Image: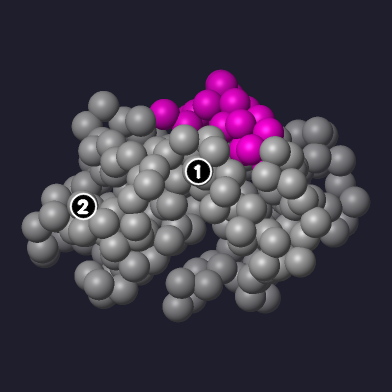
Amino acid sequence: MSNLVIAVDGPAGAGKSTIAKIIAEKLNINYIDTGAMYRAITYKCLEKNIDINNEDEVTKVAKDTEIDFKDNNIYLDGQVLTDEIRTIEVSNNVSNVAKIKDVRYLMVDVQREIGKKNSVILDGRDIGSYVFPNADYKFFLVATPEERGKRRHIELIKKGYDITLDEIIKDIVRRDEIDSNREFAPLVKAEDAIEIDTTGKSINDVVNSVLSKINV
Ligand code: DC
């Protein structure tokens, strides 16, 4: 039997990673957080004081970088990454890294290689529309900016950040705008994707909606 590929796309904070992780566990398949890949490159550039707006320099860093996934964790040049790619600084810069076409080519290659060898659920922005146009299942999760902001606010406050809900909503809307309007492989719902509005829904409800569409 060929590998199962499930695409979960949507804007920031729509619940993609939470849902994808649970589905991966339930179906016993791999989970790939593709946003973490763009975050890892952003993190490395910031550490090296590379100007994020210098596309050539950022691409050079991406070419010199090895990204792997093991046990659903991301590794940057052999080192596991966790909270360091979830900082506000990385979040504020990542959309500008993710819009660089050559960086995307490199990340997409890694994603396609993983999908060739394994059954996998990937969350991102362009998985169903560009990376795996023939994915077995495609989901597009959405929620209002207020709801997405609230979820992110709870996460950041827990981590000790002093940031208002308003600031977070503004950042989410700004990121969506860059992600949706970039020239190459923007955030877009694939024509054949199933849209699920997660506003006001529990994690369990969304997981069940997704699972009800999957026959394995
Ligand atoms: O899902 P996230 O917030 O961790 O994603 C970080 C950034 O990476 C976000 O600005 C969109 C971008 N991204 C992308 O362009 N393509 C993907 N497949 C995944 C994420």
User: Residue 140 or 203: which is nearer the viewer?
Assistant: 203
Element class at badge 1: helix
User: Looking at the rendering, which quadrant does residue 53 occupy?
Assistant: top right
Residue in view at x 64 percent, y 53 percent: 153
Task: Give amino acid for label 1.
Answer: Glu
Mark earlier in primary sequence (2, 1): 1
Task: Give amino acid for label 2.
Answer: Ser
Look at the image and say whether residue 169 sits in the magenta stretch: yes
Bounds of the magenta span?
168-188
Mark 1 crowd level (few <14, some 14–19, many ≥20, 10 Å Cα): some
Instruction: Give the mark count.
Output: 2
- Residue that carries the numbered disc 2 in the rendered image: 209
Element class at badge 2: helix
Q: Quadrant of the C terminus?
A: bottom left
- Residue that carries the numbered disc 1 in the rendered image: 147
Residue 1's spot in the image, x, y percent? 11, 64
